[in-house]
Amino acid sequence: MQTDGPTLSNLPQYEPGGSPTWPEPHEGGQRPFGPRHPPLRDMNTMILGVSLFANVVLIITLISVLFFTHTGFFSRGSPSPGVSAPGTSLGTPTVTANSASPTTGTGWLQVTPNTVHLTCSGDQNTQKVVLANTGPRKVQWQASFPNAGDSAPISVSPNQGELHAGATVEIQIQISSSSNGSQGIISFNSGNSDAGASPTLSYIADNCNNGG
């Protein structure tokens, strides 16, 4: 008579008083207890670390830029054109008046030189100046003494005339033997209203009554 069921040879063997020995799982098989968990926690930790490192680098870079900008590190070097270097100043150029240059102005008439000093004897008792017409048309001119009137200690010859465009005339300035010593100006007035401002000549006349 045949009986269906497990035989003693298929049952786990164990020693008396010991634990039964179960067969080992096959290699490559699944774990006996539950599914395997993916490493999601490790990925989150890595992403968080990279983000923190990038933020730290950005903060350090911003602090460095602000520090060097505040200390003027990026502005060092040669000064730009028109900008004075530290310890220097840009002063206004000093212009020295030249007595041999014509008077400044936009008028057609110009006199050269614009200053004379007359003495009572020698080569300086008579001096010559040049009156020029720089305008496009002829002008009438006349010399006058705005501050002295008829009592001027000097004489002008010629004291009036006509100048064509681009022409010049030589004028003689002479001290009077009765000069008491004074100074003033001679104005060369134009008869043309388009000729602009009249040029002036400054003079100094010595005192001739005391043997000067």
Image (tube, rainbow, N blue to C red):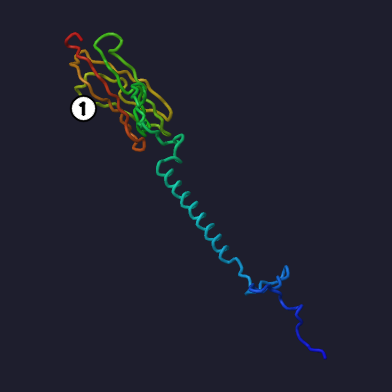
Measuring from the top left, give residue 81's x and y in whole percent.
Answer: 45, 36
From the viewer's perspective, tell me whether residue 88 is left or right of residue 27.
Answer: left
Indicate the quadrant where residue 138 lies: top left
Q: Which of 32 and 3 is in front in this view?
A: 3
- Closer-to-camera residue (56/74): 56
Residue at 30% in and 30% down: 189
For mark 1, what is the residue? 147
Q: Quadrant of the C terminus?
A: top left
Residue 56 left/right relative to 124: right
Quadrant of the snapshot with the N terminus: bottom right
* In the rendered image, the vertical position of residue 146 relative to residue 49, given as above or below: above
Q: Which of 194 and 160 is in front in this view?
A: 194
Residue sitting at x 56%, y 65%:
41
**Above or below, 164 relative to 65:** above
Residue depicted at 30% across the width and 24% down the height: 201
* Disc 1 element: loop
